[in-house]
Each structure stands twice: as structure tokens, then as C-alpha cells.
Amino acid sequence: MNRWKTIIVALTVILPAGVLPAVVSPAVAARSAAPLIENGETQPVYSRADALTETVFVEVAGVDSDADGLPDRVAVDIMRPKETDSGTKVPVIMEASPYYAGGNDVPNHVVDLDGSDPAGMEYRRNKFNDLHDEMFGDGSDVSRAVAPPFRGYYDNYFVPRGYAIALVENLGSGRATGCPTTGLDNETAGPKAAIDWLNGRARGFDAAGNEVKAGWSTGNVGMIGVSYNGTLPNAVAATGVKGLKAIVPIAAISSWYDYYRANGGVLAPGGYQGEDADVLARYVLTRQNAQQACGTLMDRIEKDQDRVTGDYSSFWDRRNYLNDVRKVRAAVFLVHGLNDWNVKTKQAVQWWDALAKRNVPRKIWLHQGAHFNPFSFAGRNAEWLRQLHRWFDFHLYGLRNGIMDEPQADVESGPGQWAQHASWPLPGTRDVRLQLAAGQDGRNGTLGADRPRGRAVVESFVDQSTRGAEQLVENTESTDPNRLAYLSGPLARDARLSGTPEVSVRAAFKGGRSPYLTALLVDYGTDARAYGDVAYGATQVCYGQGVPGDTGCARLAEHVTVTAPYKIITRGWLDVRNRDSAARTELLREDRFYDFRFDLQPGDYVVKAGHRIGVVLISTDRDFTLRLPPGTAVSVDPRASSVTLPLVGGRSAL
């Protein structure tokens, strides 16, 4: 029997409108028709098959990004219980997206700047195809042009439980007007206007131009989504809009600079070398008369993003939601993959840390997947739905169901190895500094707690751009002219990293053109590990009410593990010309030593007993950085260089 449709009559309480249960917050319930409550949860008593659907074009007041003299509009597809036409009021779960209409075929920027033949590079990719499963679960390559808008699980699961679903087609895409800008405030204004409309503060129209009001809405809204669709909840929450009670940003961006840049350097999202803000804006520009309406703006984005210096500028500052985190009044349920190199973990952790400083109500899930929806994990699907259901019931219906009393963090430390924790980084985590030491007798260097004795020894490597990081780290038996490696001894016990590592390197640069210094943190030791890939099972699991063409069932995924002698745990990058500030390029003097300090991507990772921790230094990181002419000579003073690791238990963990 489908557990999501089970109703135990003896335990149900049917509450007519105006009669409030003791578990409902009066401030919320005063605006709601009470649903069927069982065990502190809304129950699936409304019909998905009989649900009402409508499309409303919401006016984005004060925004005219296509400069046509009219306010921009977003298209909002709505599904709600049929009872809402008879006086029942319900809250709304909203997803906003520029992807519903698919995407354009847009070439990425060339990253091979050394004159080599880039024919082997995938400079032209359909991002929507790549990310479809991650955003929506297993399924065929579909867009709105060939499929109904309500795909995914929100409608099947939540409409029967007394929620409306609103899908907002954002500015510049599909049926909306205006222009996409890759994170500028006009994009934020689109779903914000939809929330305003649900609260009677904005105007909406049907296809015939008749004004439409949302009299069925309680005004309470929760936003959810994956990738760009998860970024928009962060952006809208940072406006402080009234009515947005909770968000669930999954694999989401908090600062667009950190998506396309790192510490002053031009950087690619993993898997999309050469993509930048202009490429993504052109990709989602699927509205009518797109080039005529938005072509000039696209050209301006390409110019202003600055792929030459990579500096943090006003262009990027206007796309940084951390600037307005003080305005966030919505509770935040943050989800991110620890193997996500597309939207990297820094995006989640810096947002999480900023929310924590302001005591914003919050929860976090960190999993071993990549750019992935936790709904699709076979071993965690039921728990995800339980927590998500209670999250929305608590914040949108006001049900005091204990969800905020549960442990704050759910972390998957290894494939299928989930545990709950009071907070994240894990309690008891302390920074531990490990010293780099030069190798002896032609061997790689070492990594340890003590500063090496004796005279200073300078080591060096020469930059190249043909071998990737994985190739450069794999051989620990000998040195390599294109990298430096420093390894600890075998660990006596498991050591768990939880947080953001940091490196400090004293180095000098000479010749060549690469300005990058890349640090790789490596787990050396043979093991079966998750790298982010998944495999979908053959059997479908049913989670909600189905209708013809939308069964309410899905195939779920398991981690694919690979047995290998090492894994790059995390990595970080610095444009050494930005050694003092990401916003300022300062030229270096050749052969002069400077102290470079920069962060690696945050994570949560267990290095097992018997394994060794390694720090590998390179310049060009082929899969992420620009590839400039080779030959830059990098000299390193290991005695003045170190790595700081956030270890659970501190130094005693080693």
C-alpha cells in the first residue's frame, strides 16, 4: 500500500473553517482553512485529479528590463485543490525557473588561450539536457514545449495535502517578457512579484487580459528548487518580501562571482568550461523576439563580466545575495551535494554561515551526490519527504510538529551513511594547522604537525595545461616536474573534515603567463568512494496521487562508487595577482616570494585510518581555470607554507 495515501480514520480530525486546533499557530491559522490533520501533518484528502489549473501573467511593477515601455511580466502556472473555488484558502509552494522552455544552443568562451587546437573541448552543450535529471528526477529530455508544466513531485504530493503549486516562468524565458541577466535584481523581482500577487499587492492577468486575483491564497508562500531554480529562493528571500515564510534552496548559488570566478581568477563551473554569465543569460533567453528585445543587454553582460582580470567588481557585487542576508526573514532548509563541482559547496556554506550569524531558523542536508535533488535518492526518499512535508506544514500552516526541534543537520559522510547532528560544521570541529616540508632524496614532500628543522629548501614546478589534476596527483611514488606534493604519514584513526580548509603558500612566479595557484587536498588510500554519479533503479516508487500521464511514481537512484587509490577531496584556486583582494589586480615581481593565502571548497569528508592526507600544488587546473601558454615556473618555500584543516576533535583526530 502506498504509505503516502494511507489515512487512519480513527486518528483523523476534520476541522471546519474557523475551528482551530491547539497545534496551529493563531497568526497563521487565522488566514487558513484548516486541512485534515493527523499526527501533526496535513493529510492527502484533496484530489490531484480534480485540481484546478490556471495561468496568470503577473506584472513586475517598476521593472522594464527589455525597455519596451511596459512593466515586465512573468507567467505563473498554478495548480490548486478544487475546494479553493468554494472558499477554502491554501498556502503556496512555489518554484521559479528560467529553464521551463528549455534553452538555446550557445557556444561557451574559448579557454585554450595558448594557441592550441580546442577541437577536443565541448564548447557547445545543452545545459538543460545535462541538468534535467538533477533538477526533476529521472525522465526523458523534455521541456515545456513537449510536456505539461507540472512535472516533478510537488503537485502529486502536496496538492492532495492542501497546498497550491505555483511555477513561475521567469523574466526573458518562455512566455514571460523582460530579459534574463544572470542574477541581477530584475530576475529576483519576477518571483517576488508573484508572491506579492498572492498577497494582493501586485496585478495579475489571464491570457485575455482580464485581471485575476488570488482570493484562494492564504498569502503564505514557500519556495523550492534545484540549481538556478534553487538560487531564486535565496535571491527572493534576500529582499525580505512579506509572505515568503520558508525556502528550500537545493544546489543553489549565493554569489554569482563564486560561480564563475574564484579569488580573482576566471573559473568555470564543473563540466562547463568556458561558460560565463553572458552564456547562461543567452541560454535561457527563450522569450519571443528575444534578440530584438534583449540582444543589446546580452552584449553588455558579456563586456562587463570581465574575463580578462577576473576581478570582483560592481557587476558581481550586484549579483551577491550575501549583501542582503540581513533582510532574510524566511526560514531556510539548505541542501547541497558534497561532490557538486558545478555549483560548488562554498555557495551553500557561505550562505549557511551568514544565516547562522543572524540566527535565521534553518536546517541543512549535505549528501554525497553532485548537482542533485535529494528526492531522487532511493535510500533517503521517504525521510526527505517526511522532513520536507513537516517543514512546509510548520512554516506555511503553522503546525507545531516538532520539525524545528529535530537535529539541525543531516550529513551523508559516505555512500548511504547518513547521520543527524546538532549543527554543522559538526560539533567539536577545530582548525588544525599542518606544515609542509620539502622532500628529501628525490621524494615528495611531507605534511605534519611540526615545522621542519634545518635550512630552508626551495622546491619548484613548471606549469602545463594538458594534464588534468587527477593525472597530476595519482603518482605518489615519484616527483613530477609539473606539481609539488606533500603527504602525511598513514593516519592512526579516521579523521573527519567538517568545514572550510585553507592553504598558506610562500611562492615566487617566473616566466610563462598563468597567474593561477591551485591547491588540491587529496585522500591517498584505496577505497570505494562516491564521486557524484548515480544509477537509477528499474522499479518505480510511488510517492503521491497519480493522473493519466503523471503517475506520481518515479525511479530512484543509488550512488555509483568507484574503487581507486586516491580521491581529490577538495580544491581551491587563487589568481596570485589578487593576493590581497579579489577586487584588485596587482602585478608581481618575477622571482620575488609572496605569501598567498586562500580557501579551498568546504566539505565534510572522512579520511580513513591507514590513509594519508596530501596537499598537491599546481598552477593551471585544466577542468576549471583558463589555459594560458605553459612555462610559468613556480618556486615554493615549504617551511613557510601550511594547510589548515577543520577536523572534528581537533588535533587529537590525527
Image (cartoon, helix red, strand yellow):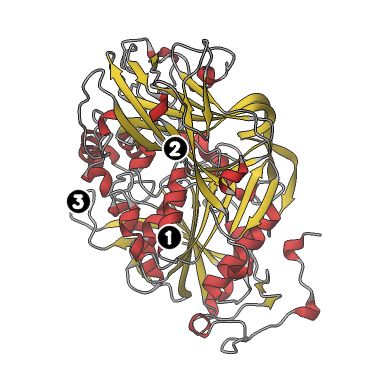
**SS class, disc 2:** loop
Residue 256, given in percent of the width and then of the height, sits at: 35, 44
- Structural crowding at the residue carrying mark 1, measured as other residues with C-alpha within 10 Å and reported as few (<14), some (14–19) or many (≥20): some
Q: Is residue 331 above or below residue 100?
A: below
| Residue named by callout 3 | 68
Q: Quadrant of residue 569?
A: top right
| Residue named by callout 2 | 600
Residue 307, given in percent of the width and then of the height, sits at: 27, 30
Residue 555, given in percent of the width and then of the height, sits at: 70, 44
Give, as a three-letter code, the residue at label 1.
Answer: Leu
The residue that appears at 32% across and 69% down in the rendered structure is 202
Q: What quarter of the picture does the C terminus occupy?
A: top right
- Structural crowding at the residue carrying mark 2, measured as other residues with C-alpha within 10 Å and reported as few (<14), some (14–19) or many (≥20): many
**SS class, disc 3:** loop
Q: In this image, 313 relative to 165: left or right?
A: left
Q: Earlier in the sequence, mark 1 or mark 2?
A: 1
Q: Using the numbered discs, state the Cα–Cα distance from disc 1 to disc 2 in whole angstroms.
A: 21 Å
Residue 6, given in percent of the width and then of the height, sits at: 77, 67
**SS class, disc 1:** helix
Q: In this image, 150 relative to 274: left or right?
A: right
Q: What quarter of the picture does the N terminus occupy?
A: bottom right
Q: Is residue 107 above or below residue 650?
A: above
Give, as a three-letter code, the residue at label 3.
Answer: Asp
Mark number displayed over residue 355: 1
Mark number displayed over residue 649: none
Q: Using the numbered discs, state the Cα–Cα distance from disc 3 to disc 2 in whole angstroms.
A: 44 Å
The residue that appears at 43% across and 72% down in the rendered structure is 214
- Pick whichever, 443 or 16, lies toward us: 443
- Pick whichever, 122 or 371, lies toward us: 371
